[in-house]
Amino acid sequence: MKVKKGDKIKVSYEGRFEDGTVFDSSEKHGQPLEFIAGVGQVVPGFDKEVIGMEKGEEKEIVIEPKEGYGELNPDLRKAIPRDMLPKDQEPKEGMILMMQAPNGQQFPAKITKVDEKTITIDLNHPLAGKKLMFKIKMEDIDSGDKGIESKV
């Protein structure tokens, strides 16, 4: 059976940057990644590559930024007044702040620069602009097609 859109699947994976550094893996999480194929629960490039795979199949894929977490967007780098931070919080480059949108949704922002009056934050996803390599293995496919008995 091959994976098709809407199938619930389990995939073991290892994600690496171009230099070979591992940034994530199913082993790190202690279990395969489970998601519904083809409906946008994972980045588009990963979603496309699992369609058509069979149980037990392994492959290596490369996901370009546009099919991953997007290109780096310079408009998502902002300078904000330093006094917007709580007085007891000393900002440092590399620190991750949790910001809150007007709708209440929280999102991370990385501090990229600190000076006397402002801090510069980057709201891009940490993997934006990066080419990603994955080794994946299809562990399980549940198509939901178990057969339907007709009661007449």
Image: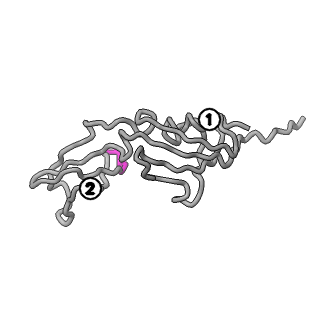
Which residue range is magenta in the image? 102-106
Residue nearer the viewer, 111 or 134: 134
Name the amino acid, label 2. Gly
Q: Earlier in the sequence, mark 1 or mark 2?
A: 1
The quarter of the image holding the C terminus is: top right
Quadrant where the N terminus is found in the figure: top right
State the residue at coordinates (66%, 40%): 7
Quadrant of res 5: top right
Q: Is residue 104 magenta?
A: yes
Q: Secondary structure at mark 1?
A: loop
Left or right of residue 71, residue 8 in this image: right
The label on residue 51 is 1
Up-down: is 81 above or below 5? below
List the residue tagged with mark 2.
94
User: Which residue sits furthest front?
Assistant: 19
Tell me residue 112's x, y (percent). 23, 50
